[in-house]
Amino acid sequence: MFKKTLSFFVSCLLIASAAVAAKEPVNLAVIKHKLERYHDSGEYLHDISDVATKALRYLELRVERGDFKGKKPAIVLDIDETSLSNYPDMVRLDFGGTIEEIRQDEDKGTDEAIEPTLKLYRYAKAHHIAVFFITGRHEEERQVTEENLQKAGYLNHDGLILRSGDYKKAPASVYKTAMRNQLTEKGYDIILNMGDQQSDLRGGYADKTFKLPNPYYLIP
């Protein structure tokens, strides 16, 4: 009797587990609609502004204190969905596309500035804080990226670091950590590091990090 009861109980658990596992995910078309609504409603820009404003306030405080540890003060910014927006291209590709298609869109050099980040950038430059861009774009994209940054208003930056050599295929967090480390070895105190991916921020070599929202794609 005990074995029959146990067998019945196990069978019920398996049926219940199967029912939970079989729950249908949210339809992809619904998710894409929510992504567009998040952007078009102004919520996306509002959330970006909230983070960038906190980064600006932190930078202002550090400038007022002047506590740069005897090093050259600097900030680090990612490019795509941090400094420049690819949103129109993402919509055109229906939030998909191949790596080649995405890179072709980047290389058109028409991405617009993300204004809250540009405001942070201008404050840093006006107060003699070096600004470095560390991006997942490749070295071959340097000229078009430089031109796009200039057109978008990011004038006279202190360095554009792109993937090259052994770092072309390295995980983003490994590559970006190594690049920040190189900056610190050159005598820079990276006051803050801002990006839209956790992989932009992991690994240290920055006094404080700021994560911008990006529900559109993930770079591990």
Image: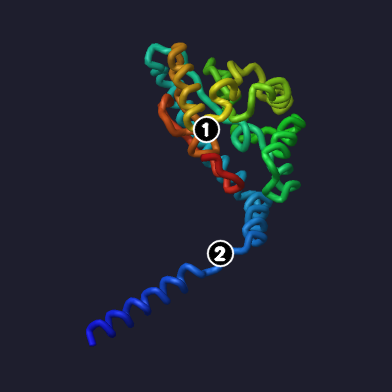
Q: Residue furthest left?
A: 2
Judged from the image, the secondary structure of the residue bearing numbered disc 1 is helix
Q: Amino acid at mark 2?
A: Pro
Above or below, comparing residue 69 to residue 107 in the picture: above
Cβ–Cβ under 8 Å for marks 1 and 2: no
| Residue positioned 73% across, 24% down in the render | 144
Residue 187 is drawn in which quadrant?
top left
Residue 92 at x, y percent in the picture: 75, 47
Measure how far apart labels 1 and 2 are at the Cα level: 29 Å
Q: Secondary structure at mark 2?
A: loop
Q: Is residue 85 left or right of residue 219?
A: right
Residue type at numbered disc 1:
Ala
Q: Quadrant of residue 147?
A: top right
Q: Indicate the position of residue 16 as horizontal and vertical percent values.
A: 41, 75
In the rendered structure, the answer to whether residue 170 lies left or right of residue 142 reads left
Query: 131 above or below 171?
Result: above
Q: Quadrant of the N terminus?
A: bottom left
Q: Where does the image place residue 207, in percent across and percent down from the top left?
A: 41, 26
For marks 1 and 2 on the same chain, the one whose residue lies earlier in the sequence: 2
For disc 2, the marked residue is 25
Badge 2: few (under 14), some or many (20 or more) residues near its Cα, within 10 Å?
few
Residue occupied by mark 1:
172
Viewer-proximal residue, 107 or 77?
A: 107
Which residue appears at 41% of the width and 17% of the height? 68
The residue at the point 55 percent across, 38 percent down is: 196
Q: Residues within 10 Å of mark 1 (few under 14, many from 20)?
A: many
Between 43 and 21, the one nearer to me in the picture: 21
